[in-house]
Image (spheres, grey):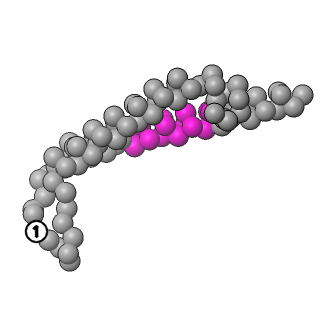
Amino acid sequence: MQSQTVNRYAKEKYQQIVTGMEEVRIAIEEAERLHRKMREPVHEKFGGWQTPDKEEIKDGIEKAKRDLETFREELKKQEVELLSRDWRI
């Protein structure tokens, strides 16, 4: 009985992280859409703040996509282990 509870708990935790990754992927896609609509900023400082240019934003989006894919690959490698050991590695 307890092993079924632990297994259900492990599956729920795993599903939470998969759902979280999907939410991050959707946010990255939205950032890409906004980036495509973005005009090149005027490079003036406003109250001590300076906005990043289009290229810096694009680089940030690409890095986020690479990091998410790396995390997804690592999670997939560890899936069986995470579920079988109740997230203790």
Q: Which residue is mark 1?
A: 44
Q: Is 25 a magenta residue? A: yes
How packed mark 1 is, by other alpha carbons closer than 10 Å (few <14, some 14-19, many 20 or more), is few
Secondary structure character of the magenta stretch overall:
helix
Farthest residue toward the bottom?
Answer: 47
Q: Which secondary structure, mark 1? A: loop
Identified at 27% across, 46% down, the residue is: 60
Q: Quadrant of the C terminus?
A: top right
The one of 87 and 51 positioned closer to us in this rendering: 87
Q: Is 26 a magenta residue? A: yes
The one of 89 and 41 positioned closer to us in this rendering: 89
Looking at the rendered structure, the kind of residue marked 1 is Glu
* Horizontal arrangement in the rendering, residue 64 relative to residue 22 (left or right): left
Q: Position of residue 79 (x, y in %)?
A: 59, 25
Identified at 40% across, 31% down, the residue is: 70
**Is residue 54 in sight in this rendering?**
yes
Q: Position of residue 56 (x, y in %)?
A: 19, 49
- Residue 79 to residue 42: above or below: above
Farthest residue toward the front?
Answer: 89
Query: Which residues are drawn in magenta?
Result: 14-27
- Residue 75 to residue 49: above or below: above
Q: Position of residue 62 (x, y in %)?
A: 27, 38
- Residue 7 to residue 23: above or below: above
Residue 30 placement: quadrant = top left
Residue 17 placement: quadrant = top right
* Horizontal arrangement in the rendering, residue 20 relative to residue 40 (left or right): right
**Is residue 29 in sight in this rendering?**
no
Q: Quadrant of the N terminus?
A: top right
